[in-house]
């Protein structure tokens, strides 16, 4: 995956979580489970895509110089 999109994926996930918290607080007595799922599933996808953009451990070990 392309690491230049990591920030975009993280931003999308965080904005989605903020929207989820706003929806829950705004509709506190009557929480709609369908709306919660509608917001949560794309958030999980964004965070998964952000996770997949991080480099492998082997690539990181080769870039780090040991003295």
Image (spheres, rainbow, N blue to C red):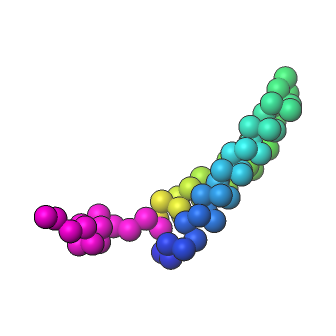
Question: Does any portion of residue 24 appear in the rendered image?
Answer: yes
Q: Going by the picture, which residue comes out furthest to the top? A: 29
In the rendered image, which quarter is residue 21 located in? top right
* Residue shown at the point (77%, 45%) measured from the top left: 19
In the rendered structure, which segment of residues is drawn in magenta? 53-67
Total numbered badges shown on the rendered structure? 0
In the rendered image, which quarter is residue 46 located in? bottom right
Q: Going by the picture, which residue comes out furthest to the front? A: 67
In the rendered structure, the answer to whether residue 45 lies left or right of residue 37 reads: left
* Residue shown at the point (63%, 65%) measured from the top left: 8
Q: Position of residue 15 (x, y in %)?
A: 71, 51
Above/below status of 56 relative to 28: below
Q: Is the C terminus in the top left, top right, bottom left or bottom right quadrant?
A: bottom left
Q: Position of residue 4 (x, y in %)?
A: 54, 74
In the rendered image, which quarter is residue 33 located in? top right
Question: Does any portion of residue 41 appear in the rendered image?
Answer: no
């Amino acid at each position: 995956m392309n690491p230049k999109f990591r920030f975009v994926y993280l931003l999308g996930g965080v904005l989605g979580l903020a929207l989820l918290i706003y929806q829950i607080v705004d509709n506190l007595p009557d929480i709609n489970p369908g709306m919660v799922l509608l917001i949560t599933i794309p958030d999980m996808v964004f965070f998964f895509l952000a996770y997949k953009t991080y480099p492998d451990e082997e690539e990181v070990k080769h870039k780090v110089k040991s003295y």
